[in-house]
Image (cartoon, rainbow, N blue to C red):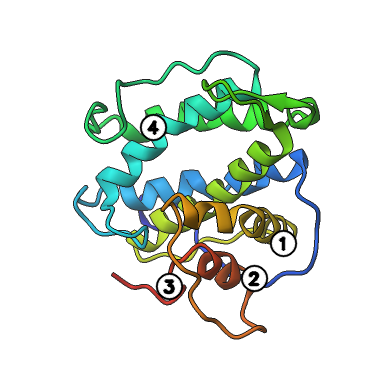
Amino acid sequence: MTPGGCPPYRRRMTSAAPVTAQLIAAAAAPHPAVVCAVADRPLDVPTPCREWDVRALVRHLLYWTPILAATGRREAPVPPAPDESGGLEVDHGWPGALASSRADLVTVWSDPDAWSGTVSMGGPAELPAAMIGGMVLGELVLHGWDLARSAGVDPHWPHEVLDGALAAVGAMAQQGRGMGVFAPAVPVPPDAPTLDLVVALSGRNPRWTG
């Protein structure tokens, strides 16, 4: 164990696996340790997530995590604030609030039934549930990595989670860039670790150090 009760971090490479409900819990598993590493740091510390500091990234997670959970339950999403940009306060209780929302998200999207058919995120369009499930998987890995790197630690995921995340991020990368969510892919060697491939595909620099 590291100081403060946070478990140590390890790194591991990958091989292929499908994007399924069975990966969600494992994708979320490093998050408590990541949050533990981040929680005592200033909220204005930068992250690899474009122009967001920790406060903005946490606000994003607190806003969208319950929406994605409601979407998987086929409930009308109720945003926790009028808007993400400034309507959600990030105070000292954010680690507990995020843990609660994340646990709900994991419960919902770990159910294979959540991945069937279509879902709505509040708009008129129905979306493939499997696409949103893949988004959840990709976001758990990408934003887990964002938070971890802001604290200078290296998170670890099982190889099947990283392979699933690579497939999920690859499926949404073009649309994400069109919406301005992802930056252009960062060049990395083809034999780079799979986590580096996932991160680079989303437009982040795997070697980001702040």
Q: Residues within 10 Å of mark 4 (few under 14, many from 20)?
A: many
Q: Percent x, y for residue 170? A: 64, 60
Say which residue label 2 marks: 194
Q: At label 1, which amino acid type do we have?
A: Asp
Of residues 3 and 200, the one nearer the viewer is: 200
Q: Which badge, 1 or 2, comes first in the chain's sequence? A: 1
Amino acid type, label 2:
Thr
**Rendered-image quadrant of the C terminus:** bottom left
Q: Position of residue 131 (x, y in %)?
A: 68, 41
Give the amino acid at mark 3.
Asn
Q: Secondary structure at mark 1?
A: helix
Q: Which mark is residue 62?
A: 4
Which tag, 4 or 2, sits closer to the chain's start?
A: 4
Q: Which mark is residue 205?
A: 3
Q: Is residue 33 above or below residue 11?
A: above
| Left or right of residue 94, residue 126 in this image | right
* Mark 1 vs 2: CB contact within 8 A: yes
